[in-house]
Image (cartoon, helix red, strand yellow):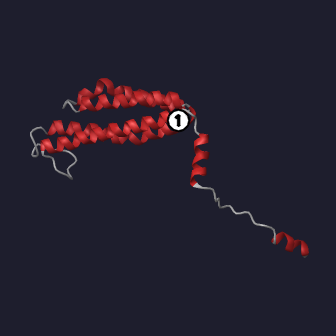
Amino acid sequence: MLQNVAVLSSPVTSPISFRSSSEKMAEIVDVLPKEYGYIILNLVAYYFLNFYMSFQVGRARKKYNVMYPALYATEADTEDYKLFNCIQRGHQNSLETLPIFFVLMVVGGLKHPVICSGLGVVYTIARFFYFTGYSSGDPNGRLPIGYVKYLVCVDFFVELV
C-alpha cells in the first residue's frame, strides 16, 4: 500500500509546453533548409504580382465603368466589354492557380529549396507575361508564354516525388 502512495505522490509530467513562442519558432526554423528563404521571397514576389494584377483590374473597372458586384462586363455595360473581361480573366486565372503554386512551393521547398525557388521565379515571370498577353484584349495573347507555367507545375510535381 505504501508503494502505491509513493507512486501517486511522484511529480506528474505535463503534456503542456511552457516554452516561449520564440523558442518554438526557433525549432521550426532549425528544421527548414538554410536556402528556404528563397521560397519565402518567391511567395512575396508572387503576392506583389497579384497586387499589380488586382490594381489593373480596378483601373479597368473605372475606365470601362464596370461596377461591383459584377465580375464580368456585358455589352450593355461598355463597348469594350471584351477588353475588360480579358483583364479580369487574366487576374482570375492567377487566383485560381495561386493555391496550387503556393502549396507546391512550400512543400517542394522543404526538400529542394533552390530548384523550387528557380522554378518559382520562372513561374512568376510567366504569370506576368500571361497576364499582360491576356490583358491585350486578345485571349490568344496569353498562349505563347502560358504553356511555360504548366511545364513549371509539372516540374514541381516531379520534385515532390
Give me the residue at 50% from left, 36% from top.
37
* Residue 24 image position (x, y, % from top left): 60, 51
> Could you tell whether 77 is left or right of 33 in the image?
left
Which quadrant: the C terminus? top right
Q: Residue lying farthest right?
A: 2
Q: Is residue 2 above or below residue 75?
A: below
Q: Residue lying farthest top?
A: 144
* Residue 76 image position (x, y, % from top left): 9, 46
Q: Residues within 10 Å of mark 1 (few under 14, many from 20)?
A: many
* Residue 19 image position (x, y, % from top left): 63, 56
> Could you tell whether 141 is left or right of 30 in the image?
left
Q: Is residue 4 above or below residue 143?
A: below
Q: Nearer the viewer, residue 129 or 22?
A: 22
Element assignment for label 1: helix
* Residue 89 image position (x, y, % from top left): 26, 39
User: What residue does disc 1 label?
Assistant: 36
Q: Is residue 138 above or below residue 106?
A: above
Q: How many numbered discs? A: 1
Give me the residue at 53% from left, 35% from top.
36
Which quadrant: the N terminus? bottom right
> Which residue type carries mark 1?
Tyr
Q: Give the quadrant of residue 120.
A: top left
Give me the residue at 32% from left, 25% from top.
145
Give me the residue at 46% from left, 27% from top.
118
Q: Nearer the viewer, residue 11 or 161?
A: 11
